[in-house]
Image: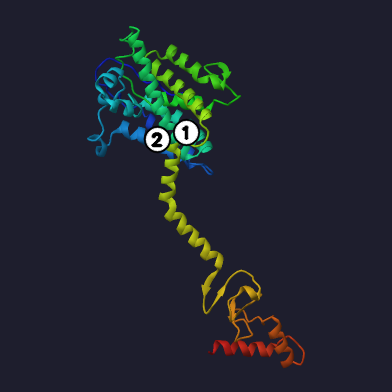
Amino acid sequence: MGSGMSRGPRRGFGLEASRGMLPLLALQVLMEYGRAGASRPPVTAALLAANVLIYLRPVALHEILPSIARASFNPQLIIEYGDWTRFFLSPFYHLSESHLFYNMTSLLWKGIHLETSMGSAEFASMVAALLGLSQGITLLLAKGLFLFGDYTAYYDQFAVGFSGVLFAMKVVLNAWSDDFVYLHGMVIPAKYAAWAELILIQVFIPGTSFLGHLGGILAGLVYLWLKRTFNGPDPFTLLITSITKVVTWPVKFAQKLLRSASSQGRITGRGRVGRRASARETGRGLWRCSTCTYDNSIATDICEMCSTAREDSSFSHRQNHRAGGSGELSVDEIRRRRLQRFDR
């Protein structure tokens, strides 16, 4: 279950002392990505890495990234002052190690299932759409409540966390599921799990952002409606797919060349060892040994690789003429020819 976007007064946020949960998160990621036969979806891994790096703020990023107080979601500052940095960055910030841990374990499970079934390009497009939709719907809900007179609880709220996007992903993941899930001792249909979780989180963790989670659920429903209305891949998916093809083209081209070279056989000595083929498939002026598939010059009647006698009709006719009708060489003749070949 994703931890909710936390709420607080207009002041800076402080990070709590480490509880040792990041090593546990790393262990879960290694178990999912390191097991044999794992799909290892790259977009999910990139999202996990981005959230963890922003939380840890290493030296290389510390001066670049805004502080959590400057990036937290606040409807009033976004609408009245145009502070859109908060709109786009706030999902990637987390208040505490436990907040990050619960959100990232939820992202790990949902992301692997969705990206494996959808493909990386479409999954990346979906996450971008859900992020924009969830943040935008939350903004509209807060503004709507402000217009109705409730401006203290939501319009001047500060919130951070990825759980709005996670609620939207849960809606998409369970949209067509007929399964049932266990949620705090209750058995409910999976497609209603997000709604039940929305209520239970507010009951057990009242400090979380109700609008942030509700905006995520509504974003998932809007995304599903758009997918049903407009069939086919969206422009963002096509863009990601095109960029991926351009970036990976040199690698695929090199692999194609290697496969082509291996299928034609490997060059060795004065001839070539390849697959079995008839005399018509060999190059002009060559004949292919039926035993070792070595391509020999027509000037010789014995394979230079394994000393097998040539089997085509012209050679058989010459051999019959030389040996009085017998098409087989004597042991002494084969030994003499081998010695003659190595003495060249």
| Rendered image quadrant of residue 67 | top left
Image-based side of 47 in relation to 293, left or right: left
Q: Secondary structure at mark 2?
A: helix
Picture disc at residue 47 = 2
Name the spot of residue 68 as percent of width and height, x first. 27, 26
What is the residue that sits farthest to the top in this orientation?
Answer: 149
- Coordinates of residue 70 in the picture (x, y in percent): 25, 25
Q: Amino acid at mark 2?
A: Leu
Q: Position of residue 138 (x, y in %)?
A: 38, 19
- Name the amino acid type tagged 1: Gly
Residue linked to disc 1: 111
Q: Residue at x 53, y 65 (%)?
A: 262
Q: Residue furthest front?
A: 230
Q: Is residue 181 left or right of residue 209?
A: right
* Residue 106, above or below 293: above
Q: Are marks 2 and 1 in contact (CB under 8 Å)?
A: yes
- The scheme the figure's colours follow is rainbow
Q: Which mark identifies residue 139?
A: none
> Which residue is rendered at x = 28% and y = 34% of the image?
57
User: In the displayed image of the protein, which residue is found farthest to the left?
Assistant: 63
332 versus 59 height, above or below: below
Please indicate whether residue 73 sits to the left or right of residue 310 in the image: left
Q: Is 227 situated above or below 148?
A: below
Along the viewing direction, whichever of 12 and 73 lies nearer the viewer: 73
Image location (x, y in percent) of residue 336: 63, 90
